[in-house]
Amino acid sequence: DIATFIRSSTEVGGDYYDFFPQKDGSLFSVCGDATGHGVTSGMMVSVTKAGLNGINPVKPNKILQRLNRVVKRIDLGTLRMSLNIAEITQNEVYLSSAAMPPIYLYKASSNAVEELMQGGLPLGGLKDETFDQLTRSFESGDVLIQLSDGLPEAPNAKGELYDYDRLKALIQSSGHLSAQQIIDVLIESVDQWLEGLRNPDDITLVVIKKINP
């Protein structure tokens, strides 16, 4: 059960998500955030998408290493691309991140949320940068959430940020819902926080819930 949401802060956004289903039934889910927003960031998204389509499906950390070399070679100046990749198999998920916000994993069996934060530089930084990889079980009812920083760092009229802890708590209380319903809950909450203000950064959510037939 997969649902997505993207809202750009300008006409051309710098956020990006994509899916790459594999012949063996596994799925690669990608969520990214280019430096800034606007046309130049949109260029980085195009480079990233093209690069991903040209890379053979290996483990997420190896994909990030290869994609980093592609972005570095093209050299778009100071532009960088933050990106995380989740490989979802029958019972496991493999996660790797290049300077993205945490990935959240809701476990249905315990009604708990794990905040998976990984280090690493954004793509286009150091040529030989390496990236860590995490492995977690992914069972019926579990929910994986990838996102850009636009939602948790959305400021209200007082300049206060929405906050990652608030987001984590809301994911825990809504994890039993469908993927689309989870997105609806999160967006309604952040829109109330913004109080009618326009979000100053792109907001992107990718929600994947495992449902066994």
Image (cartoon, rainbow, N blue to C red):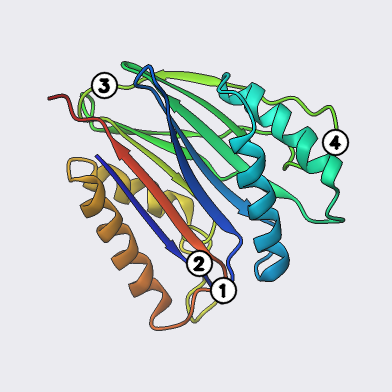
Whether label 2 touches label 1, CB < 8 Å: yes
For the residues labelled 1 and 3, the Cα–Cα distance comes to 36 Å
- Which amino acid does the dot numbered 1 rest on? Pro
Tell me which numbered mark, 2 or 1, is placed earlier along the sequence: 2
Tell me the number on the disc at residue 200.
1
Residue at 46% x, 63% y: name it. 162
Tell me the number on the disc at residue 154.
2
| Along the viewing direction, whichever of 31 and 136 lies nearer the viewer | 31
Horizontal and vertical percent for residue 210?
Answer: 25, 30
Q: Residues within 10 Å of mark 1 (few under 14, many from 20)?
A: some
Tell me which numbered mark, 2 or 4, is placed earlier along the sequence: 4
Query: Vertically, is 153 above or below 109?
Result: below
Residue identifier under label 3:
139
Q: What quarter of the picture does the C terminus occupy?
A: top left
Residue at 21% x, 24% y: name it. 140
- Which amino acid does the dot numbered 3 rest on? Glu
